[in-house]
Amino acid sequence: MKLAAHEFHGISARDLHVWRGERHVLRGLSVDAASGDCVHLAGPNGSGKTTLLRVLAGLLAAEQGGVSWRGRPIAADRDAYAATISYLGHSDGLKPDFTARENLAFECGLRRVLDAREIDEVLARVGLTGAREQPARSLSAGQRRRLAMARVILAQAALWLLDEPFTNLDTDGVQMLARVVAGHLDAGGAALIASHQPPVIPGHTARRVELA
């Protein structure tokens, strides 16, 4: 999907502070991503990468600071904001008894109208053509991650928020995902990726944001 220039002006988080009990997880953090940007959120376990993505996704409110999307606070219209992002967390979020095709038809069908051809094309793109009729519970961990990424693609969202998306992927899977992200950026989208290793995206250099 090619995003028109006027459709996406980016996300901006300013001076975010988040506590977990007595622990100050995010301390005045700011981050931006505009059309075509790939931002690598780096840092050791417990540094707040997942917390930051959840704040950016609108799933968690910061105690201080704010997040704006296209120049407006995301709290101004959360439903509209949710419709323009795609979030992939640690959990694949799949229905175990649904087949690969059924998972995509159900979850992506809640966001927009799509047909079987689109689903099959995306399954082929992530290397799951042969597994499309298998229930999710029978898929390997790597296959489930591929299926979760297929859901991200089908959402046709301008902003991708990806939490350790390369987990459980083999070498071919990592390269596939890198190509998918590159295609998204080339189309005018943006991606924030939390990962231990710097993502190598063909034709793009990820901007690193270090979380202490």
Image (spheres, rainbow, N blue to C red):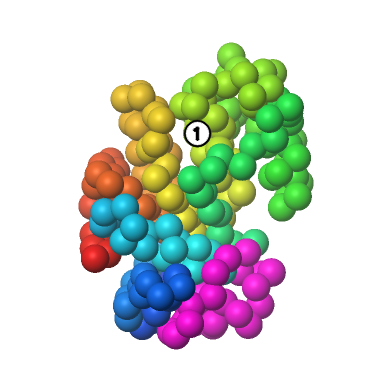
- The residue wearing badge 1 is 145
Placement of 162 over or under 70, stated as above or below: above
Residue 36 visible: no
In the rendering, at what x and y percent does residue 158 appear? 52, 58
Q: Position of residue 92 (x, y in %)?
A: 56, 40
Quarter of the image that includes the C terminus: bottom left
* Residue ID at (58%, 27%): 123
Q: Is residue 20 left or right of residue 154?
A: left
Stretch in magenta: 59-82
- Identify the residue at horizontal 62%, vertical 19% (top origin): 138
| Circle 1 crowding by C-alpha within 10 Å: few under 14, some 14–19, many from 20 | many
Q: Quadrant of residue 174?
A: top left
Direction front: furthest residue? 22
Which image quadrant is residue 179 in? top left
Percent position (x, y) of residue 175? 33, 31
* Nearest to the observer: residue 181 or residue 135: 135
Q: Secondary structure at mark 1?
A: helix
Tell which of 203 and 173 is nearer to you.
173
Tell me the kind of residue under disc 1. Answer: Arg
Q: Is residue 31 visible in the rendered structure shown here? A: yes
Q: Position of residue 70 (x, y in %)?
A: 50, 76
Asked where in the image residue 188 lies, by quadrant, the reply is bottom left
Task: State whether residue 101 is above or below residue 8.
Answer: above
Looking at this rendering, what residue extends furthest in the top direction? 130
Relative to 136, 106 lies left or right: right
Does 191 appear in magenta?
no
Residue at 67 percent across and 18 percent down: it is 134
